[in-house]
Amino acid sequence: MKMKYYLLIFVGLFFSIGQIIAQSVQLSKKGTENMEISILYDNYVCTEGTQADWGFSCVLKVDGQQILFDTGTKPKILMDNINIIGTKLSEIDQVFISHNHHDHTGGLWTVLGEKNKIPVHLPYPADANLKNRTSELGGFPKSKEEPFSLSDHVWSGGTMGKDIREQCVVIHHKKGLIVIAGCSHPGIAEMLEQIKNDFGKEIYAVMGGFHLMRHSNKQVESIIEDFRKMGVKKCGCTHCTGEKQIQQFREAFGEDFIEMGTGRKIII
Ligand SMILES: [Fe+2]
Ligand SMILES: [Fe+2]
């Protein structure tokens, strides 16, 4: 009986140590209790007066900071939407670029014209042109391959993928991790799996572009199944996910589907 007891303790310890070793990120004990996302640029409109266009950008308010995630495609549309939504670029504390595609970097130079002397986090390795122009315009380009923190509860999930290198934002919320993705070129399920392992926490919600336009019904079904296995509770896909594919997620998640679109404010 005693032997069985010791064996159980040993197995328990073995798995806990294994988990700590696999986990490369050490989060603070408590997750944030509130975060807000405003969508500035998207393929779909939510608020009347704002314009839709191919691309993505949103602003995150967490830890008393405002982080601009990607910058859309056309500077004029970005600025028009920003004016209607009421975001003040002068109040942005950091810029985060998910990947070096024009529909995510298009407004960066205009943003830096309005607010500079702030960190601009580029995927690793930083593209020379993106890095140099950021510096010329007064921004502070930064680039790191491993996950790193932007504030107490906001992280980069680390740069992933081989051909197209991409990073996403991970928010440590008391309900679990909240992931914001630009295009998910390395594969959304693969990215979430890596984040879940590195951060050692359940993924509560995932939002952004999933890049599944050419995925069949069956392939999307299998990704939804992967989400379920990973314990993802809420999902808000948009931008390059594909219309039919968005509808599939909408139906699968029901009330837990997060509608996106320009002007949408999401508070969790
Ligand atoms: Fe995109
Ligand atoms: Fe992309």
Image (cartoon, rainbow, N blue to C red):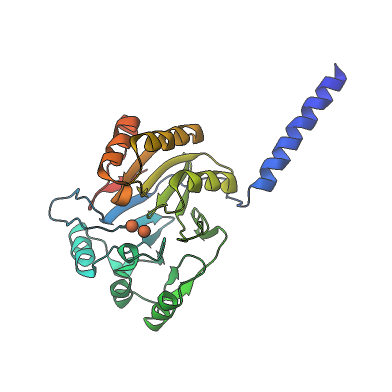
Residue at the image position 19 percent from the left and 55 percent from the top: 52
**Which residue lies most toward the bottom here?**
136
Residue at the image position 53 percent from the left and 59 percent from the top: 149
Q: Position of residue 76 (x, y in %)?
A: 19, 69
- Left of 82 or right of it: where is 36? right
- Left of 19 or right of it: where is 124? left
Q: Position of residue 47 (x, y in %)?
A: 17, 50
Residue at the image position 68 percent from the left and 45 percent from the top: 20
Q: How many marks?
A: 0
**Which residue lies most toward the top here?**
1
Q: Position of residue 16 (x, y in %)?
A: 70, 38
Residue 10 visible in the shown view: yes
Residue 233 visible in the shown view: no
Check the picture and name the quadrant holding the C terminus. Answer: top left
Between 22 and 266, the one nearer to me in the picture: 22
**Which residue lies most toward the left here?**
49
Check the picture and name the quadrant holding the N terminus. Answer: top right
Between 184 and 111, the one nearer to me in the picture: 184
Image: 231 above or below 265: above
Q: Position of residue 40 (x, y in %)?
A: 26, 57
Q: Quadrant of ligand 1?
A: bottom left
Image: 265 above or below 88: above
